[in-house]
Amino acid sequence: MPRNRKNGSGNGVNYLVPALAGLALLAGCMGGPEAPSMLQTHEQAGPNAVGALGQPAGSGLIGDLQARRSVLPPGGSYAKISDAVIQAGSGAAQAELRVAQLKANAQAKNWLPSIGPSVNLTSLGGLAASLLLEQAMFDNGRRKAERAFASADVEVAAVSLSTAMNQRVFDGLTYYVNAQRARAQATVAQAAAQKLQEFNTIMGKRVAGGLSDGSEQQVLNQRVAEMQATVSVDLQTEASQMAQLAALTGQPMAGVNGLDTLPDTGKSSTEPLAVVKARGEGARAIAQAQMQLAGMKFGLSTTAGLDEGGVNPGLRLNGTGRLNPGAKDNIAALQQTGDVVDRQTAEAAETANRRIVALQQQKANLASRRAQGAEVLQQTAANLDLFTQQYKVGRRTLLELVGQYDAYARLQRDQASLGYDMALIDLEIARDRGLLVDGARM
């Protein structure tokens, strides 16, 4: 049985110091050869996916995100809403990014020797405690891949943060635009209800004078009630949207009015956030595959144990994955990681581009509808003037005039909504491209 000592021998400590220094020098030789070329991407891979030998490309995702500038006009109504929304954010995505950064900082030091306690059960049934220092000499690039994985994880978290902030600003602006739409429609409907009420007053006098019967009065009363109900719905919609905006920003935004004109971001060269995230996740997947491949190969590390007997140097052979059943299939699957990543990134780019093209076409259709609606509205206004003149000379009844005016007012109300639909599409495209928030604010 070894003698029990509380702190170990002084000579053991003296031996451990040079051992630590020697292993620290060996740390400079860590990493082994570069990762195998079997993770190299297929020939059709774009330059933004992965780099040579399957290494995650130096994509600079975070730098790209920070360089983005918001398309919201400074000092405008959109910018005011955006500032309020960002200031009231809960910061959950920021917290996730900070966690990823801390993990990456920890992995950046993984080339240093590891040190920790070791407790073994001796052959005589006793416990032998020692301090074990281990330094990898040859690990097939495993620790380098670990650092690449942590770095890619930070980039993915940064893209998630950008996506969350742009989505939050978009939600706030959607509430605002819908409230502005409801306000504009309510203004049209209120003017129409007032005009219909004037017609109703005239009809009341005609019924009292025996020129019209009560059925015509009832028809007109119904039209007035319908238009007043439309006014109530519009006002309630405005109040609801502004209430949701206030809940999002933590403050009332009643003093903000009007819409801002945004630049055309549909043809912008800025990469959509969905594609940026796909590239970041691809780099992370490649790093993970490299870690797994390195773990399946044999590696060598040096050890130095300090116990009651002094320093016990040794070598340790790591990695026995190739001896396991199914190792060949596992390696073959990992070899396809680069190709899968490229294809997934290309698919994400195609999906994002199709979506933006569809939104652009939808906006073009709305613009065409608005132009056609303006012509129809102008013709309807001309017909209304004609009906008014004919009514004055007795060629049209009051109900016919009221019907023409009601159609004109409802068409005018619908026409007022189209511009807000187009504004929402502009915001949606800017959100997908990550251009609603300055990258420097993240």
Image (cartoon, rainbow, N blue to C red):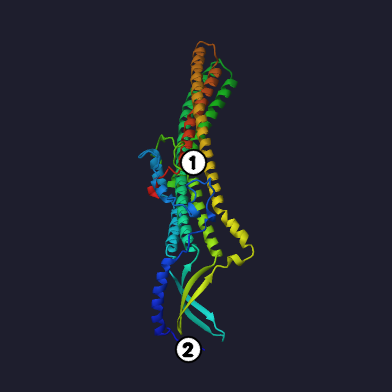
Question: Marks 1 and 2: in contact by CB < 8 Å?
Answer: no
Q: For the residues carrying marks 2 and 1, which lies nearer the camera in this image?
A: 2
Say whether disc 2 or disc 1 marks the residue closer to the N-terminus. 2
- Could you tell whether 83 is left or right of 186 in the image? left
Q: Is residue 429 above or below residue 213?
A: below
Camera sees residue 250: no
Q: Give the image location of residue 115, x and y in percent.
A: 45, 73
- Could you tell whether 334 is left or right of 108 in the image? right
Dot 1 amino acid type: Ser
Return the residue nearer the eye: 306 or 118. Answer: 306
Return the residue nearer the eye: 287 or 90. Answer: 287
Disc 1 target residue: 240
Question: Please, which residue is most extreme toward the right here?
Answer: 325
What's the CA distance linking mark 2 and mark 1? 79 Å
Give the SS element for disc 2.
loop
Return the residue nearer the eye: 220 or 3. Answer: 3
Q: Is residue 151 above or below residue 77?
A: below
Give the SS element for disc 1.
helix
Q: Which mark is residue 295?
A: none
Disc 2 target residue: 3
Dot 2 amino acid type: Arg
Q: Give the image location of residue 391, x and y in percent.
A: 52, 14
Residue 113 lies in quadrant: bottom left
Q: Residues within 10 Å of mark 2 (few under 14, many from 20)?
A: few
Q: Give the image location of residue 151, x and y in percent.
A: 45, 57
